[in-house]
């Protein structure tokens, strides 16, 4: 089996990495059915000494995950991408966690909105949201992965059809092709589970969630969902459903 704390793709040949990925999948299967707390405890113990960090855009699951992870390791870094298009309410919940002592690390795109407009024209999000997300979300996330060996994320399987197959332990690829362990401790949670946790633990959350929003990203690309689809208010009417960071 993989030695304690080893990270797939961090060293060795391609064949060794493939073996490690197989072992990661086996370990992921073994963690199925365990609580989010137990999964996180295992991750912090198994990968002790490695660079472990969360990413969050301060959606309800992200807020729950930060609270859960900090209960085990209070100083775990929380990386968050500030695209320049965030709601004031999102910035407020970010600061609420910072006020509680969370190690919030804000990562910004390499270009300002103004420079982006000079290069690509104004409001790129309205004409080519994939290109805008690449510049303002995906590229910054690649830089976050350069700083991590283990990336903990808050996605749930029942958020979208495309997320149904999400493993508890998977991997993501850095810009140089090397792999980072990607952990999704909340995969089995429902929306109800998330809200129960937030309420039971009095966790800060985005005030827009009390105003009919169910999934919150950048202001120009976020609306109240027209129906029951939790993520239906994101890039509404464009056919786009993901920003791209979960395809790294
Ligand atoms: Fe641009 Fe919209 Fe993507 Fe934000 S969500 S980076 S504004 S396209």
Image (cartoon, rainbow, N blue to C red):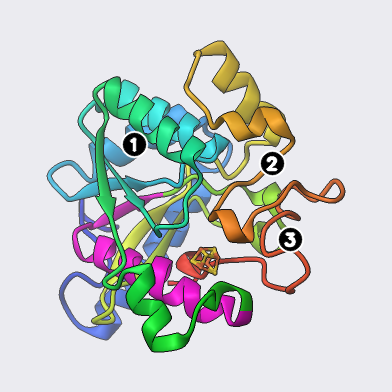
Q: Secondary structure at mark 2?
A: loop
> Do residues under tags 2 and 3 come within 8 Å of each other at their CB atoms?
no
Check mark 3 vs ligand 1: CB closer than 8 Å? yes or no. Answer: no
Q: Quadrant of residue 234?
A: bottom right
Tell me the distance, in whole angstroms, between the alpha carbons under discs 2 and 3.
16 Å
> Which residues are the magenta region?
127-152
For label 2, the residue is 214
Q: Residue 158 or 203: which is nearer the viewer?
A: 203
Quickly name the residue at label 3: 161
Element under disc 3: helix
Where does the N terminus fall, quadrant-wise?
Answer: bottom left
**Residue 72 visible at all:** no
Residue that badge 1 annotates: 42
Of the image marks 2 and 3, the number of the one nearer the N terminus: 3
Indicate which disc, 2 or 1, sits on the residue closer to the N terminus: 1
Q: At 46% across and 60% down in the image, what residue appears?
A: 25
Q: Is residue 175 above or below residue 147?
A: below
Left or right side of 159 for 34? left
Q: Single out the mark in the foreground, 2 or 1.
A: 2
Residue 186 shows in the view: yes
Q: Residue furthest bottom?
A: 119
Q: Earlier in the sequence, mark 3 or mark 1?
A: 1
Which residue is at 42% across, 32% downward? Answer: 92
Q: Position of residue 192 (x, y in %)?
A: 71, 28
Tag on residue 31?
Answer: none
In the rendered view, would you say 154 is above or below 83?
above
Check contact, mark 2 vs mark 1: CB within 8 A. Answer: no
Q: CA distance from mark 2 to mark 1?
A: 30 Å
**Is residue 141 magenta-colored?**
yes
């Amino acid at each position: 089996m993989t030695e304690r704390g080893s990270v797939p793709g961090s060293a060795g040949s391609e064949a060794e990495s493939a073996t490690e990925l197989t072992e990661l999948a086996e370990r992921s299967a073994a963690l199925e059915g365990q609580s989010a707390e137990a999964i996180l405890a295992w991750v912090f113990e198994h990968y002790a000494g490695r660079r472990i960090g969360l990413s969050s855009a301060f959606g309800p699951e992200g807020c729950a995950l930060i609270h859960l992870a900090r209960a085990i390791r209070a100083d775990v870094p929380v990386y968050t991408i500030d695209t320049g298009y965030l709601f004031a309410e999102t910035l407020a919940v970010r600061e609420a966690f910072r006020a509680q002592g969370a190690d919030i690390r804000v990562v910004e795109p390499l270009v300002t909105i103004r420079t982006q407009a000079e290069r690509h024209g104004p409001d790129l999000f309205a004409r080519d949201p994939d290109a805008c997300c690449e510049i303002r979300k995906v590229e910054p996330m690649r830089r976050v992965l350069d700083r991590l060996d283990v990336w903990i994320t808050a996605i749930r399987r029942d958020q979208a059809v495309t997320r149904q197959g999400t493993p508890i332990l998977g991997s993501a690829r850095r810009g140089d092709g090397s792999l980072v362990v990607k952990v999704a401790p909340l995969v089995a949670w429902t929306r109800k589970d998330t809200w129960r946790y937030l309420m039971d633990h009095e966790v800060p959350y985005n005030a827009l969630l009390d105003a009919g929003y169910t999934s919150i990203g950048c202001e120009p690309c976020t609306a109240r969902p027209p129906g029951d689809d939790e993520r239906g208010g994101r890039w509404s009417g464009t056919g786009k459903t993901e920003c791209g960071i979960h395809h790294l």
